[in-house]
Image (tube, grey):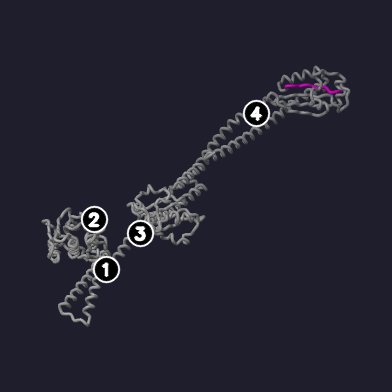
């Protein structure tokens, strides 16, 4: 039997039924005994009357006929079902006896032996009381009987039915049963109602509330007002729910912080359970491998990401923590950062550093899961390559002018040779030129460094585009000497909010690049137009152009376009500086190129009608 309600109802019903049965049994037995005692007392009284009537008849010398007349009169009363006079041995010996006057059973024989006997038996569903009383010889009896005084002359046997009393008993029991049954039924209904209202209903409320709390509804509260232990129990449940709600809120807050940290991490992260199945991934991992978390969650992480160490071995077969579940992380220091590679969404292998964090059961220290953190080293590798390239480039660019300076200075310092003034001046001009070259290189490096750090102040103002172009071209004397520069300015160009010197630096770099790479004798075209709220500058040449692979990297630091059989001096910093300056102005810079036709470099600056100047 399931459920507290039917159990309590069965228990209460059983107790009630036992109580009713016990009460009815007690009343029935009590009434039966009372009526039986009354019936027996009446039967004894009637028997005594019959005995005295017969004894008086026989004492007065009544013969057999007289006794029969007395017996007949007594029978007519309807009280006796049987009435006989039994003759004892002295009377039988003296007068004889009919069969009806002789003893017929053991009770009668016991009575003739001098014992007064009574018996109650059931007959046809009713009780019958039988009395057998001996008749003793008295002195007056010797006038008629020849017997000793004290001897038993005979016995009187009577049977009295208690049917009338039993009928009364049954009627009274039926009436009593109706009254008591109705009263007890009403009392039972009242008890059931009281149990339901005072016990079962509060228990049902507590059960439903506990189920709601167990299912996660920690805001649920129990409303029990019984002013007893059940109310105290409900209050304890409410207190527990409040504590759980507070604890769950703190846990949920901490969990949200951890999840937010994992989700916002630039490192790719996935978590595996004890069965090595992925239970969580972050966005960085989705971007890295090109798969959604719906595809990844639930799959086995073994071999899924194909992570390999530097020597090409699969980490799943060598360094996975699931291979050593009982080892401590401290005993495997190499797990803190294993460099390797893994396939990415682009189809290329990415250099990564993967580290593991173990999740253990606090009770038995068993491994419950592993947190895998993948740090993309591609950018670092690129930076290292760029650093190496930069060091090589800078050392080369610095070594060449330094060698020239050192050579000319050493030559001038020789004491065994006298140089004329023209030669000395030529040497000094070479030293000055190479020193300027060193200063320009250092200046570019410092300029880019300040732009990337955001520490270079911008002194912006509204400046006419035409004045900007004229100022830049007026400084390009080396270009005007052997290459034609064409300028196409759209009419009505608005002034631009800019730092003039920095934008001049951008245009100068673009024009110098075009001059370096364009075919000799071909012109450089400088165009400016306004469109969609921007002023767009374009510097184009008719050079060999740039391949699509190199076009993607031309704005990277220290990157220079390489052409077979052609070497162009430079540091690879000019376009990187241009990009940082334009972006600092809120603009865009890009390039288009067709190999064999030429290249076009664009940058745009936003048109501001009335710039806001912050004072103070």
| Mark closer to the observer (1, 4) | 1
Quote the CA–CA distance across marks 1 and 4: 134 Å
Disc 3 vs disc 1: which is toward the camera? Answer: 1
Residue 64 spot, x, y in % from top left: 81, 18
> What residue sits right under mark 3 in the picture?
377
Q: Secondary structure at mark 1?
A: helix
Label 2 crowd (10 A; few <14 / some 14-19 / many >=20): some
Rounded to the nearest angstrom, the CA distance separating label 2 from label 1 is: 26 Å
Mark 2 or mark 4, earlier in chain: 4
Which residue occupies the foreground of this view, 293 or 476?
476
**What numbered label is drawn on residue 396?**
1
**Between discs 1 and 4, the one toward the N terminus:** 4
Question: Mark 3 to mark 1: distance in Å?
Answer: 28 Å
Residue placed under numbered mark 4 in the picture: 169
Q: Is residue 114 above or below residue 198?
A: above
In which quadrant is the C terminus drawn? bottom left
Q: Residues within 10 Å of mark 4 (few under 14, many from 20)?
A: some
Q: Secondary structure at mark 4?
A: helix
The answer to which image quadrant residue 114 occupies is top right
């Amino acid at each position: 039997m399931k459920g507290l309600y039917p159990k309590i109802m069965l228990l209460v019903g059983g107790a009630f039924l036992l109580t009713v049965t016990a009460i009815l049994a007690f009343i029935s037995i009590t009434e039966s005994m009372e009526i039986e005692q009354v019936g027996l007392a009446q039967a004894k009284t009637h028997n005594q009357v019959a005995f005295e009537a017969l004894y008086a008849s026989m004492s007065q010398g009544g013969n057999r006929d007289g006794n029969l007349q007395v017996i007949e009169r007594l029978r007519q009363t309807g009280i006796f079902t049987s009435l006989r006079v039994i003759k004892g041995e002295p009377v039988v010996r003296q007068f004889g006896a009919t069969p009806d006057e002789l003893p017929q059973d053991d009770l009668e024989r016991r009575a003739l032996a001098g014992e007064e006997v009574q018996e109650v038996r059931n007959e046809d569903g009713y009780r019958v009381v039988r009395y057998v009383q001996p008749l003793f010889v008295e002195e007056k009896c010797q006038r008629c009987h020849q017997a000793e005084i004290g001897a038993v002359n005979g016995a009187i046997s009577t049977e009295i039915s208690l049917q009338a009393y039993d009928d009364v008993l049954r009627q009274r029991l039926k009436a009593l049963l109706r009254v008591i049954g109705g009263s007890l039924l009403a009392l039972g209904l009242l008890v059931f109602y009281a149990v339901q209202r005072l016990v079962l209903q509060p228990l049902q409320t507590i059960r439903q509330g506990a189920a709601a709390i167990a299912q996660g509804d920690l805001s649920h509260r129990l409303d029990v007002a019984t002013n007893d232990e059940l109310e105290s129990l409900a209050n304890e449940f409410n207190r527990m729910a409040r504590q759980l709600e507070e604890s769950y809120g703190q846990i949920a807050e901490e969990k949200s912080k951890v999840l937010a940290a994992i989700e916002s991490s630039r490192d790719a992260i996935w978590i595996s359970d004890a069965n090595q199945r992925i239970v969580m991934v972050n966005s960085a991992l989705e971007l890295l491998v090109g798969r959604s978390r719906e595809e990844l969650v639930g799959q086995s992480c073994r071999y899924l990401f194909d992570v390999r160490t530097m020597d090409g071995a699969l980490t799943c077969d060598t360094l996975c923590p699931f291979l050593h579940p009982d080892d401590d992380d401290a005993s495997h220091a190499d797990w803190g950062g294993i460099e390797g590679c893994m396939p990415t969404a682009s189809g290329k292998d990415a250099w990564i550093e993967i580290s593991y964090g173990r999740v253990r059961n606090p009770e038995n220290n068993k491994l419950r899961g592993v947190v895998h953190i993948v740090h993309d080293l591609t950018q670092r590798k690129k930076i290292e390559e760029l650093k190496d390239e930069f060091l090589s480039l800078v050392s080369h660019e610095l070594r060449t002018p330094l060698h020239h300076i050192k050579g000319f200075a050493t030559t001038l310092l020789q004491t065994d040779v006298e140089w004329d003034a023209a030669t000395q001046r030529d040497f000094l001009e070479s030293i000055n030129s190479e020193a300027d070259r060193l200063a320009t290189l250092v200046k570019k490096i410092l300029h880019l460094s300040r732009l990337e750090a955001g520490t270079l102040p911008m002194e912006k103002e509204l400046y006419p585009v035409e004045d900007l172009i004229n100022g830049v071209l007026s400084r390009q004397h080396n270009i005007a000497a052997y290459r034609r520069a064409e300028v196409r300015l759209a009419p009505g160009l608005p002034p631009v909010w800019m730092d003039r010197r920095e934008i001049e630096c951008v245009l100068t770099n673009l024009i110098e690049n075009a001059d370096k790479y364009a075919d000799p004798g071909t012109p450089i075209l400088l165009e400016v137009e306004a469109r969609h709220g921007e002023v767009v500058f374009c510097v184009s040449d008719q050079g060999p152009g740039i391949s699509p692979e190199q076009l993607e990297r031309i704005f990277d630091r220290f990157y220079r376009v390489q052409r077979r059989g052609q070497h162009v001096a430079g540091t690879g910093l000019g376009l990187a500086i241009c990009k940082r300056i334009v972006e600092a102005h809120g603009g865009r810079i890009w390039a288009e190129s067709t190999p064999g036709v030429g290249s076009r470099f664009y940058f745009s600056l936003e048109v501001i009608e009335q710039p806001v100047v912050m004072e103070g």
